[in-house]
Image (cartoon, grey):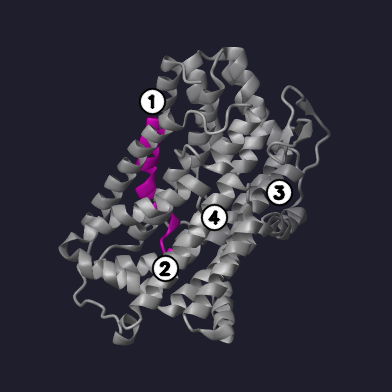
């Protein structure tokens, strides 16, 4: 008997787009008023202004038109994927990344499983400081080289890269695209409650890493022959070290730009272009070789960029059909009738549901936080608790939702079937949601402000 399989990612996302179009005929149209917020430089909803409006259902043709509109809407993210992909292809062409992988595998020996926490922590830091998602896509081939040499599966590669980054994002005390925007919108001091969040970040990341290590060892097939690094590559250790230093410096500048300068995707893209050019020159690829490497990276990232645009098209359809606000209003309003703790945990669960049609965490913050902040005040709930509910609910949903274009692109790049990932990640998702509920409950008990 054949096991059931999920459809191709493009088929799955197209089905979600059509399902969203059907919802525009089923759900009543409604909207909140919106206003520009100078502090966050974003347009946010105005609480208490929801009202029904004339329906504007999305027909079949317009549903497909939403696909190029989704690509247009996600242009800054798609361009980031292309340009980072090009930059890291330049790094790969120099041999620096492969030399680093060879060095790690040669030194780990029988302690191969230790690669899991090392790599996981690296990607988790990316999630903590800058909501690392699309940036992972061009790094997946390098992680696959490492896992293949150690005898681990492609699913392990995804878990210790994307999985760790998503968990880091969901529990981060400083993520500018999640907790930063949510705190600004809710008029809560920026980075407040950081120590409390950090404690649960350590617990969540430890849980994820242990589970990944157990799965890695359970599915490991020890390689029969070690892949030798060409001698010509090893002669350039100093140059490769300089290149890896440039990569590290780039990420350090990226953190500074995000946390101190308020950078967005376009500044990030520009920074990685500079990194790619600098690496190409130092790696002696020449200008033509560097340009050719960028072009190779663009080709390799094309499918990933298309997946991101298809995923964004889902929210385009829901927005065009005027039902995004209806969904938010309908899900959050009943929470006012629940006891305080149940209402807070309910907020987390509702934020998880909302994240399926609104896969942008920053977009979800400006959509939902103005709605649940007055609700929290009405219930006598700390705004910090409401932010935790948003942070955990939206962030952890990224582990599973097919509307997360970055996740689908990462799985496609790694050659991991979506259903296999869901089978592995769902129990961990449930445990992490439970940890989030404990965090929220404890925050209420101690009066976290």
Q: Gap in Å between the C-alphas at discs 2 and 1?
A: 40 Å
Q: Earlier in the sequence, mark 3 or mark 2?
A: 2
Work out whether mark 2 precedes mark 1 in sequence or the reverse, and give the earlier one.
2
Magenta stretch contains residue 433: yes
Q: Can residue 400 be seen at all in this image of the molecule?
A: no
Magenta span dominant secondary structure: helix
The residue closer to the viewer here, 198 or 157, is 198
Residue to which mark 2 is pinned:
244
**Foreground tag (3 vs 2):** 2
Q: Which numbered disc, 4 or 2, marks the residue that appears first in the sequence?
A: 2
Residue at the disc numbered 4: 254
Q: Is residue 348 magenta?
A: no
Q: CA distance from mark 4 to mark 2?
A: 15 Å
Q: Which residues are magenta?
A: 414-435
Q: Nearer the viewer, residue 115 or 254?
A: 254
Front position among marks 2 and 1: 2
| Above or below, comparing residue 105 to residue 4 in the picture | below
Q: CA distance from mark 4 to mark 1?
A: 33 Å
Q: CA distance from mark 4 to mark 3?
A: 29 Å
Measure the C-alpha gap from mark 3 to mark 2.
39 Å
């Amino acid at each position: 008997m054949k096991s059931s399989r999920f459809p191709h990612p493009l088929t799955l996302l197209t089905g979600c787009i059509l399902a969203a179009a059907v919802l525009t005929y089923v759900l009543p149209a409604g909207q909140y008023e919106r206003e520009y917020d100078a502090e966050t430089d974003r347009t946010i909803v105005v609480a208490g202004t929801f009202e029904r409006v004339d329906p504007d259902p999305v027909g079949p043709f317009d549903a497909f038109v939403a696909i190029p509109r989704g690509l247009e809407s996600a242009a800054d993210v798609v361009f980031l994927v292309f340009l980072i992909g090009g930059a890291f292809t330049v790094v790969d062409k120099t041999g620096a990344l492969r030399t680093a992988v060879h060095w790690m595998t040669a030194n780990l020996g029988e302690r191969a499983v230790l690669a899991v926490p090392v790599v996981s922590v690296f990607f988790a830091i990316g999630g903590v400081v800058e909501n690392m998602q699309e940036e992972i896509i061009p790094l997946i081939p390098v992680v696959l080289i490492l896992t293949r040499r150690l005898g681990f599966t492609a699913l392990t590669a995804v878990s210790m890269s994307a999985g760790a980054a998503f968990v880091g994002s969901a529990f981060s005390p400083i993520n500018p695209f999640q907790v930063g925007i949510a705190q600004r919108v809710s008029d809560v001091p920026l980075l407040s409650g950081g120590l409390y969040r950090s404690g649960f970040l350590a617990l969540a990341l430890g849980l994820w890493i242990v589970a990944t290590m157990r799965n890695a060892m359970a599915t490991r097939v020890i390689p029969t022959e070690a892949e030798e690094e060409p001698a010509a590559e090893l002669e350039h250790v100093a140059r490769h070290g300089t290149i890896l230093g440039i990569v590290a410096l780039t990420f350090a500048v990226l953190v500074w730009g995000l946390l101190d300068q308020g950078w967005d995707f376009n500044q990030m893209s520009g920074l990685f272009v500079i990194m790619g050019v600098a690496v190409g020159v130092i790696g002696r690829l020449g200008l033509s070789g560097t340009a050719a490497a960028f072009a190779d990276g663009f080709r390799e990232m094309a499918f990933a960029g298309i997946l991101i645009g298809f995923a964004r098209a889902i929210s385009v359809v829901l927005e065009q059909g005027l039902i995004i606000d209806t969904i938010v209003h309908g899900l959050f309003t009943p929470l006012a009738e629940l006891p305080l703790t149940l209402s807070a945990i309910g907020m987390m669960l509702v934020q998880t549901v909302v994240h399926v049609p609104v896969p942008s965490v920053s977009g979800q913050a400006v959509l939902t936080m103005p709605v649940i902040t007055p609700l929290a005040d009405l219930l006598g709930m700390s705004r910090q608790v409401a932010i935790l509910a948003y942070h955990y609910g939206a962030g952890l949903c990224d582990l599973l939702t097919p509307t997360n274009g970055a996740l689908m692109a990462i799985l496609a790049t790694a050659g991991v079937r979506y259903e296999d990932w869901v089978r592995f990640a769902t129990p961990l998702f449930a445990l992490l949601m439970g940890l989030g509920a404990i965090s929220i409950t404890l925050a209420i008990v101690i009066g976290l402000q």
